[in-house]
Image (cartoon, helix red, strand yellow):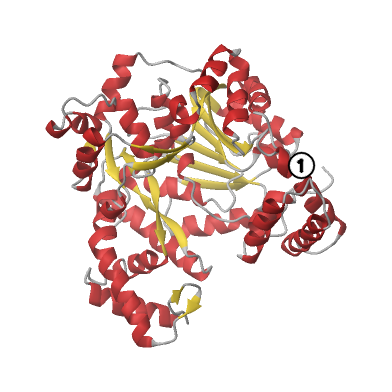
Amino acid sequence: MSTWNDGYVSDIEYLPGFYVDQSPAHLDLVCLLRNVEPPVAAGEPFRYCELGCGVGESALAIAAANPDSEVWGFDFNPAHIARGRELARSGGLGNIRLEEASFEELAQSDRFGLPVFDYITLHGVWAWISAANRAAITRFIDRHLKPGGLAYVTYNALPGWTSTMPLQRLISDFAAQGHERSDIGVSKAIDLARRVCDAGAGLLPADLVARLEKERDSGNLAYLSHEYLNAHWAPCYHADVARDLAAAKLEFVGSANLLENFPELSLNAGQRTLIQDAPDGMRETLRDYFMVRTFRRDVFMRGVRLIPDRRRDKRLRERSLMLVVPPSAVTRDIKVPLGEANLNEGFYAPALKALTEGPRSIGELLDLPEAAGSTASAREVLGMLVGSRQAMAVVNAVTPEAVVAARTYNRHHLAACADAGRAVTALAAPAIGSAVTVTVFEMLAYEALTSGTSADPAALTAAVWTLLQSRGDKVRHEGSIIESEEENLRILRDNMEKITMVALPLWRRLGAL
């Protein structure tokens, strides 16, 4: 390699973020929906590895939510690893190792004394790196994923990205001509794209250029740089990814977007017939012609073990679900790949009502007297409620020790987010072995609560206002800073009342507080 970054953007850090689909708890559900044995039994400790982990936010949250499991994260950017290690140290996480290494180094040597993993994941990596690096990842998986282990790979998908490829090439080539930092270069390249589009370049769709301008004007230059400026940017057909990973004995299982595993919600009858009649190796790629997926979330396994239907149904009935949205946000109208769907009122109305009262097993929901006569299956219930992001599966018993560990990590994580001016992040939650999204007012309330403030709206309002003042911050409303102290306090009080009524009980059930 001529330079250490091998054509990958490294002069600005990648955006931090938690991606729930990467968590073992979620990936296990994909397996169950596809009649496949998960890598480990529910609630058992696991070994997890994330390749290209960035600053490690997903890996750190998974470690914090699963203190008995072993988590590793690798990234070639030393700034990312340094930042992640500092948070692991301050957050008290002793079950995670973050290491600086390239994919080629990982494939060629074992200087870290790595174990065999149950899960190996990579998010936003495969379509942005060279063919040589993709081959190195495959070799690493071949060496370090156990038989029956799971690999999760996301990538920009073809043919969905076809119309955007000329725009990406224009932006990438123009930015490469200058010597500015990547965020400056991508901004100037978008200006060029606008001028070329306005001059009548039919291959640059105006709506795509407008979308990039909106992202830039919203301050998302780090995302745009890492998405469009990598030298080896190359969207992929599923068939090509599956062929490459077959060298590590991986077989495709399903999509981490749970609703995509239900053909009737993704394709019309004619499309389903065409896919059913197609050769096995073409089916997923053919689906992308109909669904126009621009981003795939693929789950592969090294040794697929099918579960008999009866055993699968028993396991699904035993799975408990917990709502992760406020009761006021619960809905039977959900978005599906084909558009929108309305969940059957006869079953889902009483089932959702029961879940607002607390976690329930899928079997308990199916056996509700109010739902008698329903034709809903355990598989459908899991797919619809978790797939619509209204519920998550309960996977761990919440112990006092687990709560303390999650709270310690969450406090330090939120402090780092506040320093960076982030308005959204995620709280590690032991009950679900994963994390839940929190917004800025919830972040502030959590900081105050874990600093000893009582769960009283008035006390929380005063504590959060003091916290904001100590940081030189004020409340923002519709993008504008609220100057009046009285108005700041009013908005804070309204939000603290909602948080104590809705978010606080949820955080306690999740073991996040």
| Lateral position of residue 109 relative to residue 88, left or right | right
Q: Position of residue 328 (x, y in %)?
A: 28, 54
246, above or below 103, in the image: above
**Is 128 positioned to the left or the right of 123 in the image?**
right
Please give the name of the residue rendered at 27% of the width and 26% of the height, measured from the top-left corner. 376
Camera-side residue of 12 and 269: 269
| Mark 1, other Cα within 10 Å: few <14 / some 14–19 / many ≥20 | some
Left or right of 445, for residue 290:
right
From the top left corner, tell me how far across and down residue 295 is, in percent: 60, 39
Report the residue that reaches farthest toward the left.
369
- Which quadrant of the structure image shows residue 373? top left
53 w.r.t. 303: above or below? below
Location of residue 457 with respect to 242 vertically, above or below: below
Determine if residue 249 is in view.
no
Which residue carries the number 1 mark?
232
Residue 7 on image: x %, y % = 78, 47
- Residue at 55% x, 40% y: name it: 50
Question: Split into 4 quadrants, where in the image is the N terminus?
Answer: top right
Front residue of 128 and 192: 192
Q: Quadrant of the C terminus?
A: bottom left
> SS of the residue at dot 1?
loop
Q: Residue at x 49, y 58 (%)?
A: 87
Residue appearing at x 41%, y 62% in the figure: 439
Q: Position of residue 190 (x, y in %)?
A: 75, 59
* Quarter residue 487 falls in: bottom left
